[in-house]
Image (cartoon, rainbow, N blue to C red):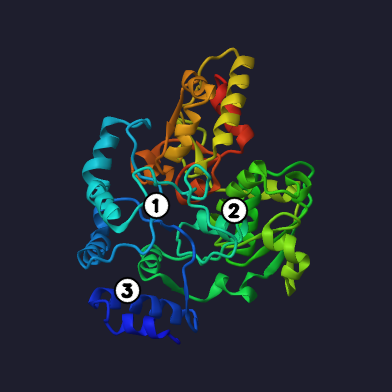
Amino acid sequence: MKLSPEQQAMLDGEKGETMAKVVKTLVMYGETFGAERMVPITSKYGHTVISFGLKIMKPVYDLYQEIIDAGLVSGQKFTADPRPMDKNVPSSLIEDLIFKKFMYTQQDDFEQQLRSLGITSDDGYTCTCYLDQVGNKPKKGDILSWAESSAVVYANSVLGARCNRNSGIIELMGSIAGFVPEFGLLLDENRKATWVVEVKCSTKPDAQLLGSAIGMKVMEDVPYVKGLDKWLGTELNDDACTYLKDFGAATASNGAVGLYHIENLTPEAVELGEGMIADDAQVYVIDDAELERVKANYPVIWKNPDAKPQLCFVGCPHMTLQQLIDWTERIGEALRQNGLKKVTVPTVFTAAVPVIKEFEKTPYFKQSKRQGIVLSSLCPLMYMNNPLCKSKAVITSSNKLRTYTSARYYTEAEILKAITTKEGKK
């Protein structure tokens, strides 16, 4: 790898032994993937995927402490993934004991480390850091050092920024050094689509289900999606961006997609059209039957597959302000039609703290409380890591949560029915 004189001096120890280790790590990382040089990070903020204080991760916290002791705060402020716990989310005393005494025992100490390293604020814990209320929104062409897969795919695809699917720690080291190795999705040639996905559904496909189907088919490749603009339009407005947030999270978790293009909608597809498609691209056709096939093949790993839902999570990735409003309205209407006042399954909406604060200013906040909805900024996935919680019959509209936990996937329509009827959907 060819380093600049300044980078070589850092590697040689000019800024101390610890910084030399950081740069050496980035060099080794880049050389593994054939990077020929480092490129400067140009985004205002970073984002770290590690936000949980698991005792088993002590070597990570020791490494962070070495960095802090050396005075190497992050070269840029950063946001972090959601916290793993929230007292407002339904849990038993025994579940709480496991959370606090056996699982996230290092949470307070680790959060202090993040403050020392440069987290934006105590409200900076979310997987949707790019939302306007949070403020970590890169510009087109920005070079990032992020990890969280759903945020990386959104930044690459919807915002037109450039970032690889980095691991935890590596992303923070990039922020500390101020540069990252140039390979993968940072290069023009690797941003071309190697799959063309033709969407031929009769109605607007569920975002999480469509993303799941594409992710499992193309895996880590780049898809160019045709036909979706029929429902999303050709403008990246709030509705389109919200859809793509959930769609992208499913492609990234059910596969390993770091970038997708939507015909006539996402920046590079608008600018270059089919010029973003590689010559030897494969074709995948998705219709109603294909989506049904994908959904029918999801495993149900509840102990009792016919159990009545005990808990519902909506918001993985975190919800937008408009989603909070729309879901509140839809639930209210369904409850009225069914002669009910509150949801019949404990239901948690998760969103970033700044988004929740904006929601609290609207009349829908009191309505959601009357309907029995719990608002939280936690990470549902981290909640489900508790062995007692994972034994519950949990339903979710998130294909990411379904993939990584024992939660069962329901479409949004199925979720609505399950939580607003006396019987629910089994």
Whether 421 is drawn above or below 280: the answer is: above
Residue 296 showing in the rendered view: no
Q: Position of residue 41 (x, y in %)?
A: 46, 68
Three-letter amino acid code of the residue under disc 2: Gly
- Judge left or right: residue 6 versus residue 227: left
Q: Secondary structure at mark 3?
A: helix
Residue at screen point 56% across, 26% down = 328
Task: Report the Cα–Cα distance between label 3 and label 2.
Answer: 31 Å
Q: In what quadrant of the picture does the N terminus appear?
A: bottom left
| Residue at numbered disc 1 | 80
Instruction: Say few, some or many: other residues with alpha carbon within 10 Å of mark 2 (under 14 / 14 to 19 / 20 or more).
Output: many
Q: Which mark is residue 132?
A: none
| Residue at numbered disc 3 | 22
Q: Are marks 3 and 1 in contact (CB under 8 Å)?
A: no
- Judge left or right: residue 311 versus residue 94: right
Instruction: Say few, some or many: other residues with alpha carbon within 10 Å of mark 3 (under 14 / 14 to 19 / 20 or more).
Output: many
Residue at screen point 38% across, 67% down = 170
Q: In what quadrant of the picture does the C terminus appear?
A: top right
Residue at screen point 21% across, 43% down = 101
Query: Which dot, 1 or 2, sits closer to the camera?
Result: 1
